[in-house]
Amino acid sequence: MPALPGAVASTKAARSMAARGGTMAAGRVYDIVVFGASGFTGQFVVEEVARAAAATAAGEGQLCSGRLRWAVAGRSREKLRAVLDRAAERLGKAAPGEEVGVLLCDVGDAGSLAAMAKQTRVVLNCVGPYRFFGEPVVEACVENGASCIDISGEPQFLEGMYLKYNERAAEKGVYVVGSCGFDSIPADMGVLYTRDKLKGTLTAVESFLSVKSGPEGLGVHDGTWKSAVYGLADEASLKKLRKQIGYAPVPVVGAKLKKRGFMFYSPEFKEYCLTFMGSDGSVVKRTQRYLHTELQQTPVQYGAYVTVGGLGSVIKLMFLGMLFLLLVKFNFGRKLLTKYPEFFSAGRFSKKGPTQKQMDGTSFTMTFFGEGYSEGQDPQKSKPNVKICTEVKGPEPGYVATPIAMVQAALSLLEDSASLPKRGGVYSPGAAFSKTKLIDRLNKRGVEFSVISKPEV
């Protein structure tokens, strides 16, 4: 692929702002650039940034300039323009105007990525699978002084970026925050919310994810499917990576959280449940390790599960799961899985992604059951004596809740800077945002955190 001639801003507004660089925060033309804006998920992130820009213009934000300056970025000017036109048709009063920049850049062209990063304070990276396309963006951001947010649910990528770029990001004073979508902001921030609502010391939490769909059923774009295929195929590399990082063990405080079986029946939900295979467990553990080692907070043990329904659903899922795990071990099997996602997922994953009706009819609830010790109780000398139940609920996870979470995380970076970790670096969401107003921001945008049952001894 031929190299692009750098990132090119297409609007007069962007050029005139660039000429006045000294009047802008850190001399940057933009606050946010959405990279991969014309991709399936990127188009919804664009709409969410447009809503945030409209809210800021109406006086709801706290940016120094009083408005959110943003741009879209990708390989094709025509596709980027089409995404902005689509957003304008769908958003009405919040529609993006001519002030939105259009930047041409390609993940395979380091020069264009550097040019993009130099122009913005934060890059929202929507180009996955991240194991293949994520690192060049992280490197460009770190070296050129821009913070970077992604929505990766791929532990190997997330932890690999920590190993390679944490120290350099700290030197540069920038924040690289991964897994800022449905993977894994509800889980990571949900554990912190549960901790903060317990009067005492929280020591263990289990979360149960339930996704409900309407008559049109559930739909997911095959980009998520591909990430799962390549992630499970390369699981051995993740173990080697963690040995290389040399993580300090996280101490168990209080009673040890018992591991459940891979499948079990939950009397609380009256459904069968499975261990959740996503990134939530690894992301929460990274956050708890950081809070313990850097801020001397009590670490919380965590288990993640997903409800799957009755016995018929379990049998169907077990069959599909075994077939998936068998095929993913072999190159030809991975080719089959990625070529025919709809067939191997019983219609849930497709190259077209969900329809608007499917998204409108889908929602999620994540329920947290926490236990710990009331004030004055020593976790090392007694049994847990206090429990709490909290909940995070929101709209369709992949393309409604994920853009909301990603954009509100970016606004926390921009507006809550005094509450971020003192050093830059590569962080999990909870580590980066534990002291910010991120949960308040999410509540206002429909990803709602609440206490279901108050702490009871």
Image: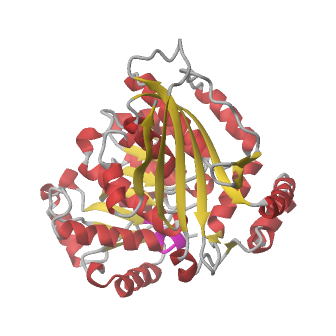
Q: Is residue 421 magenta?
A: no
Q: Is residue 425 visible?
A: no
Residue 410: quarter of image? bottom left
Residue 244: quarter of image? top right
**Residue occupying the point 65% across, 34% down:** 241
Of residue 258 and residue 85, the one placed in the foreground of this image is 258
**Residue occupying the point 65% across, 47% down:** 305
Q: Is residue 419 left or right of residue 243?
A: left
Of residue 78 and residue 247, the one placed in the foreground of this image is 247
Whether 241 is drawn above or below 279: the answer is above
Q: Is residue 142 visible?
A: yes
Instruction: Give the image location of residue 162, x and y in percent.
Output: 51, 38
Instruction: Give the image location of residue 17, x and y in percent.
Output: 18, 67
Q: Is residue 389 left or right of residue 145?
A: right
Write down the region rendered in magenta. 35-42
Looking at the picture, the colour scheme in use is secondary structure
Whether 332 is drawn above or below 276: the answer is below
Q: Farthest residue to the front: give it.
A: 457
